[in-house]
Amino acid sequence: MEKIDGILLKEMLESGMNNLSNHSNEVDALNVFPVPDGDTGTNMSLTISNGVNAALKEESKKVGKILKTLSRGLLMGARGNSGVITSQIFRGIYQSLQDNETIDAQELAQALVNGSRVAYRAVMRPVEGTILTVVREAADYTYAFAKTEQVTDCIAVMEKMVVEANESLLRTPELLPVLEEVGVVDSGGKGLCVIFEGFLSALKGQKVLLQANTSASESAQAKVEGQEEEYGFCTEFILALSEIGMKHFSEVDFANELATIGNSIVCVQDEDIVKVHVHTLEPYTAIKMGKRRGRFIKLKIENMQEQHDNILEKEKEEPKPVVKKAEHKEYAIITVAPGNGIDEMFRDLRADIVVGGGQTMNPSTEDFVSAINTLNADHIFILPNNGNIVMAANQAAQVCEDQDIHVLPTKTIPQGLAACIMFNPGVGLEENLSEMNYAITNVKSGEVTYAIKDTTYEGLQIKNGEFMGIFGKNIVASCPDCLEATKILLDHMLDDESELVTLIYGQEASKGMAELIASYIEENSDAEVEIYEGKQPVYSFIIGVE
């Protein structure tokens, strides 16, 4: 095949999207940390779906125009670091082919190299043994092959890319010791391989179809198609609780968690089976909530907007109200929070907009852009509060380059809270940035959650279902009892200079448990303790020590 035209390109894109959706759970499972938040596959799937669905609607048959639409869709829909890097890879591919009507083999090889280069430039500190390594090595080998052999067959180029990408993927544990210890390959690299494999299948006339029973792909599609809809989605599923899910499940807590994203909630448990109904604009989030607790037996998502549109077809459409920006102010703060309680904490500390999300629900670039566009401030601070959200926030700042936006590198909730506390609307920009950044470096962060698999991490034996204490990026405790894990974590966090401990308990804990931990802190240190109900999922406790 000497040329790829616009029609075939769309088939390749759809095939790659479907293949990733079908394998998103497999990619998620490659998460290094054994915590219930491995979402690389889901983030990449949502990112790709947002871009590809836009590209499929592009009327032009020129590959340059299709890739431009794809690139924009990926940019705005990017979630998590893997999603942002993926968007940058395809941005580079678009830049190389933006004037093309078709693609030949040599142009394809060159575009893949440019995708690699653009992705590397987008990352401040590139880490080898990741998706960046996979795309760079595969693209470079493919380009050398295409040039040396004077290849004219696009299928041969993509075959080489797939082979080299998978070979590079297998070498990622050699470059990242933590991958070797846990016994996995890089999850982002795996996701990219799956996308390219979908491209290759379409080139060979065997386009990958979306598997009807792939819940992650359905939720990804639903999120992309429904994020703008007023009426959202009627989301129903039947869930078989896992052993860990049975241990921790509560109908009331789960219904309260669903209430943060929707209404018309029904949640009924019958032993290890849970039936759920919710109307929501965020079906992806509802499915992620369920996925943490077990496996899906049945899943149905219906677009209520389409049903509503059918009713209104014969009625005159009313003009949409004009969305007004907020009143002008010197400063505004956008922050991210995973629970209603933490949301309130940030609002009490002058946050203007709290974007829902966190470790298990990474907001997209577009979520940040939408928040920015509702503000009217001279200077805007964004606090991502999660290492996997920082890149999406930075990308949003680049999209809104006409505004003065400062993304502070908050990677935890305690860092975000500390930064907000130090914000002073009565002082200048540079002083605020200095004080807020200092606060970020002056707080220790810890979390307590449960393990989802047996593994070994830096010599620590971890068993499925045990509670883990995580201090920064290190797992320092793993034991059957939540309170005991929390105490071990605190032993690592507290020292003679500790003055204040912020203890935020989530849905998996209680105020009584928090009070017992507070007593332990007071008995073993001179630090004061402040207790808050964060209502966050997954993490029993989030702890900040200053």
Image (tube, grey):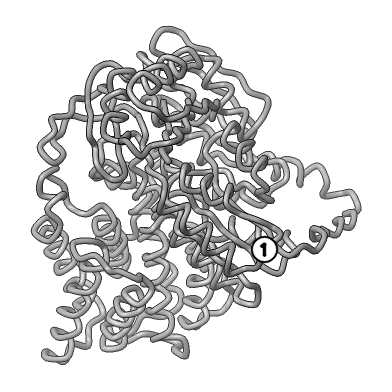
Q: From the viewer's side, name the closer residue of 253 and 311.
A: 253
Q: Quadrant of the N terminus?
A: bottom left
Q: From the viewer's side, name the closer residue of 433 and 311.
A: 433
In this view, 410 is above or below 513: below
- Image location of residue 443, percent across then percent down: 41, 46
Pointer 1 residue? 427
Task: Determine which quarter of the picture holds residue 490.
Answer: top left
- Image location of residue 303, percent across then percent down: 63, 41
Q: Is residue 321 left or right of residue 401?
A: right
Q: Is residue 421 left or right of residue 49?
A: right
Q: Quadrant of the C terminus?
A: top left
Task: Determine which quarter of the picture holds residue 519.
Answer: top left
Q: Is residue 400 left or right of residue 271?
A: right
Who's the residue at 53% across and 13% down the image? 268
- Image location of residue 529, percent across then percent down: 48, 27
- Residue 243 visible in the snapshot: no
Q: Is residue 511 left or right of residue 133?
A: right
Three-letter code, disc 1: Val
- Image location of residue 44, percent across then percent down: 39, 55
